[in-house]
């Protein structure tokens, strides 16, 4: 699919391929040619939802293909639209396409708001760094807190007019004007994110975890979607790219850095939430400190985020709402031992949150 057209390859009952390029405005005409028992595959692109929503009600299923994993197309020596479409049809017929989960439209819209906020926050940070560089070039140190509010910005702007010449003062003035504008836009986006995020299933559960705020909870919920589509927390961790790369051949096994697949924004939110959560949870603080002494701060932060993700998974899966997160007590004073469906849980107490704890194993070694 492209912004203005798309190419199709139809594998007919006679095993012949019929290829055609359509204008995007003719998407409705293409949909009319489909039957209820048809199967459709489409590459993951920016406008894939437009195609999916137009075609999905008229066919048996629509597979959205993860092109990063489907190397047959990306590594092809004959990279043409018609050849790619034929390849998709051939592998769809054999059910060998790696697919990607397409979020519900409402979730996708809220997720887009969180990404827009992240973009603006990064732009604001860039502008603040430029202001800091200007002051540093003049031999002055500017504390971070002095750029955190509009009142503080006004004070720094007045100071800049006194110590800088006209051109440098103008540059600072323009930067501050942009920072104020971004502050207003970020506040507007955050208000919408909190409002819409509060309507999502699992929001109350996640925000009961000390360290996870409204924005971070919304980011995680829009990224995860329906938590029950993940059989265990390991699969969720792999989905978010917070598991190590593994190279296992013959007698050689090597584990490298995390894969970083999935949402970078969700991983960043997990790391930030973990660093806040350890201030409230003695167990998480001790776990982080122990790993920090052994492996360094960077790896300890990632391991802490992975530990918090396990708690997030079980919280959403079992619909836990914490009354006192540091002591791991739910509302009503309940210490969770088992999930509602009877599945074993690592989290029965702070002792069972430790890496050495065995799932569902009692003190005498019996399950």
Image (cartoon, rainbow, N blue to C red):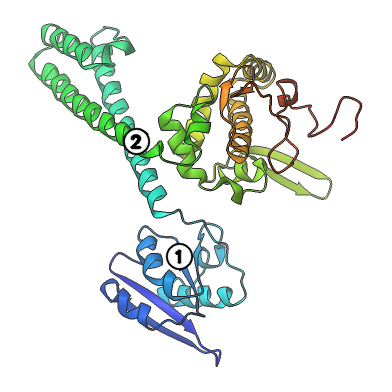
- Occupied quadrant, residue 299: top right
Compared with residue 333, is residue 106 higher up or lower down, i.e. above or below? below
Compared with residue 239, is residue 272 higher up or lower down, i.e. above or below? above
The single residue placed furthest to the bottom in the displayed view is 14
How far is mark 1 from mark 2, CA to CA? 33 Å
- Occupied quadrant, residue 5: bottom left
Compared with residue 260, is residue 12 higher up or lower down, i.e. above or below? below
Disc 1 crowd rating (10 Å Cα; few below 14, some 14-19, many 20+) is some
Disc 2 crowd rating (10 Å Cα; few below 14, some 14-19, many 20+) is some
Residue 43 circle label: 1
Answer yes or no: is residue 118 visible.
no
Q: Which quadrant, please, contains the N terminus? A: bottom left
Q: Nearer the viewer, mark 1 or mark 2?
A: 2
> Residue at the location (53% across, 32% down)?
205
Residue 195 circle label: 2
Q: Between residue 136 and residue 291, name the one nearer to us.
A: 291
Q: Between residue 301 and residue 251, name the one nearer to us.
A: 301
Q: State the image coordinates of residue 94 (x, y, percent, origin top left).
A: 62, 75
Q: Which quadrant, please, contains the C terminus? A: top right
């Amino acid at each position: 699919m492209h912004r203005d057209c798309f190419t199709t390859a139809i594998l007919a009952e006679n095993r012949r391929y019929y290829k055609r390029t359509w204008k995007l405005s003719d998407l409705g005409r293409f949909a009319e040619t489909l039957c209820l028992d048809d199967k459709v595959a489409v590459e993951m692109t920016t406008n894939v939802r437009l195609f999916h929503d137009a075609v999905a009600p008229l066919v048996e299923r629509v597979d959205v293909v993860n092109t990063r994993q489907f190397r047959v197309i990306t590594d092809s020596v004959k990279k043409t639209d018609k050849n790619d479409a034929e390849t998709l049809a051939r592998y769809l017929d054999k059910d060998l396409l790696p697919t990607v989960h397409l979020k519900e439209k409402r979730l996708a819209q809220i997720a887009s708001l969180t990404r827009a906020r992240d973009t603006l926050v990064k732009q604001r940070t860039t502008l603040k760094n430029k202001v800091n560089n200007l002051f540093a070039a003049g031999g002055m140190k500017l504390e971070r807190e002095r750029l955190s509010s509009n009142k503080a910005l006004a004070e720094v702007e007045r100071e800049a007019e006194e110590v800088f010449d006209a051109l440098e003062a103008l540059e600072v003035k323009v930067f501050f004007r942009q920072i104020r504008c971004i502050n207003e836009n970020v506040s507007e986006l955050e208000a919408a994110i909190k409002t819409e995020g509060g309507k999502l299933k699992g929001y109350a559960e996640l925000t009961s975890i000390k360290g996870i705020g409204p924005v971070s909870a919304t980011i995680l919920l829009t990224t995860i979607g329906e938590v029950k589509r993940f059989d265990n927390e390991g699969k969720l961790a792999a989905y978010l790219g917070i598991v190590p790369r593994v190279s296992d051949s013959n007698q050689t096994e090597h584990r490298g850095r995390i894969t970083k697949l999935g949402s970078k924004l969700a991983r960043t939110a997990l790391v930030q939430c973990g660093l806040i959560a350890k201030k409230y949870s003695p167990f998480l603080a001790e776990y982080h400190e122990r790993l920090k002494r052994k492996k360094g701060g960077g790896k300890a932060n990632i391991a802490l985020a992975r530990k918090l993700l396990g708690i997030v998974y079980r919280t959403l899966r079992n619909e836990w709402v914490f009354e006192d997160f540091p002591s791991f007590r739910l509302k009503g004073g309940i210490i969770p031992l088992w999930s509602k469906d009877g599945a074993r849980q690592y989290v029965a107490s702070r002792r069972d949150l430790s890496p050495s704890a065995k799932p569902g194993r009692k003190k005498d070694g019996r399950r």
